[in-house]
Image (cartoon, rainbow, N blue to C red):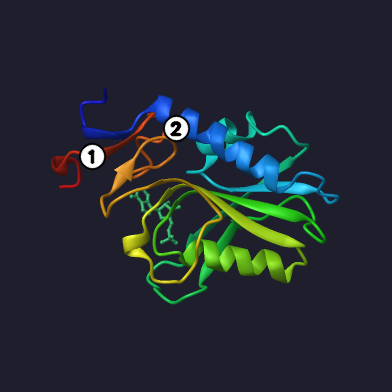
C-alpha cells in the first residue's frame, strides 16, 4: 500500500465488481435504444473509472472527453471554464456523463445543463463515488458506485495536488500529507 494512505476505503476488487453491476444496469436501461449512446468522461479523474466501466458494457457506445474547471476565486454557480470541449456533436444523442465523485454538485449540474442546451436527447450521470453530505446543488447521479462519508479521498482517478490518481483503490490520505 502507498505509505501516505491512512486506510483503504474501497478495494480494487470491490470497484471492479461494482463496475460490472453498473454496466449491467446501463445495458438494461438502454436496451433497444435507437439513438447513439455517448459516454462523456470528465477529465482527468474519471479516466480509470470510465475504462473499467465501458469494458463491461455490451451495447454499442462511443466515448468523448471534456475538461472543465472552476474559475479561480469564484464560488458562484455555473461559473466553469471549458478547457477542452467535446469533439463530437451531441444533438439528439443520449449522453452518459462519467464522473469520479459528486461533491457539491456544481460541476455536474453545469455540464449537464450545457449538454442539454446543445441539444442532447438525454443526459444521465454515472459516478464512481457520491458524497451527499457535501451537496450544495440538488443533483442526483443516476448510477452510483459507492457512497462515501465527508472525507477527502484519493485513488482510482481521484487526486490530491495531481497525485495518487494511479492508486488501484480508493483511500484516505494521512493527515500529514495535507500539511
Ligand atoms: P463538485 O463540483 O463540487 O461536485 O466537484 C467535483 C470535483 O471535485 C470532482 O470531480 C473532484 O475533482 C473534486 N473532488 C471532490 N471531492 C473530492 C475528494 O474527496 N477527493 C478528490 N477530489 C475531490
Which numbered tag is attached to residue 150?
A: none
Q: Residue at x 82, y 45 (%)?
A: 32
Q: Nearer the viewer, residue 149 or 85?
A: 149
Q: Position of residue 56 (x, y in %)?
A: 63, 30
For this orientation, the residue located farthest to the right is: 34
Question: Quarter-wise, where is residue 124 in the image?
Answer: bottom right
In percent of the image, x 65 and y 68: which residue is there? 114
Left or right: residue 11 versus residue 83 is left
Query: Is the C-beta separation of discs 1 and 2 under 8 Å?
Result: no
Residue plotted at (21% across, 32% down): 4
In what quadrant of the picture does the N terminus appear?
top left
The residue that mark 1 highlights is 173
Q: Which mark is residue 15?
A: 2
User: Pointer 1: residues within 10 angstroms few (<14), some, or many (20+)?
Assistant: many
Classify mark 2: helix, strand or loop: helix
Disc 1 under 8 Å from ligand 1? The reply is no
Asked whether 79 or 17 is in front, the reply is 17
Q: Nearer the viewer, mark 1 or mark 2?
A: 2
Instruction: Measuring from the top left, give residue 8's x and y in whole percent.
Output: 27, 32
As measured in the structure, the alpha-carbon distance from the residue carrying label 1 to the one carrying label 2 is: 19 Å
Amino acid at each position: 500500500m502507498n505509505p501516505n494512505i491512512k486506510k483503504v476505503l474501497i478495494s480494487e476488487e470491490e470497484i471492479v465488481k461494482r463496475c460490472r453491476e453498473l454496466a449491467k444496469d446501463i445495458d438494461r436501461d438502454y436496451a433497444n435504444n435507437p439513438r447513439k449512446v455517448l459516454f462523456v468522461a470528465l477529465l482527468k479523474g474519471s479516466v480509470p473509472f470510465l475504462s473499467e466501466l465501458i469494458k463491461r458494457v455490451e451495447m454499442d457506445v462511443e466515448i468523448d472527453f471534456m475538461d472543465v474547471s472552476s474559475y479561480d476565486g469564484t464560488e458562484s454557480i455555473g461559473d466553469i471554464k471549458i478547457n477542452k470541449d467535446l469533439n463530437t456533436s451531441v444533438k439528439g444523442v443520449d449522453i452518459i456523463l462519467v464522473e469520479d465523485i459528486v461533491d457539491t454538485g456544481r460541476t455536474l449540474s453545469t455540464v449537464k445543463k450545457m449538454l442539454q442546451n446543445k441539444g442532447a436527447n438525454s443526459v444521465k450521470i454515472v459516478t464512481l463515488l457520491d458524497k451527499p453530505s457535501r451537496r450544495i446543488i440538488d443533483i442526483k447521479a443516476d448510477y452510483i458506485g459507492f457512497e462515501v462519508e465527508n472525507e477527502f479521498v484519493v485513488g482510482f482517478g481521484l487526486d490530491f495536488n495531481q497525485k495518487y490518481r494511479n492508486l488501484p483503490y480508493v483511500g484516505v490520505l494521512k493527515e500529514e500529507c495535507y500539511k
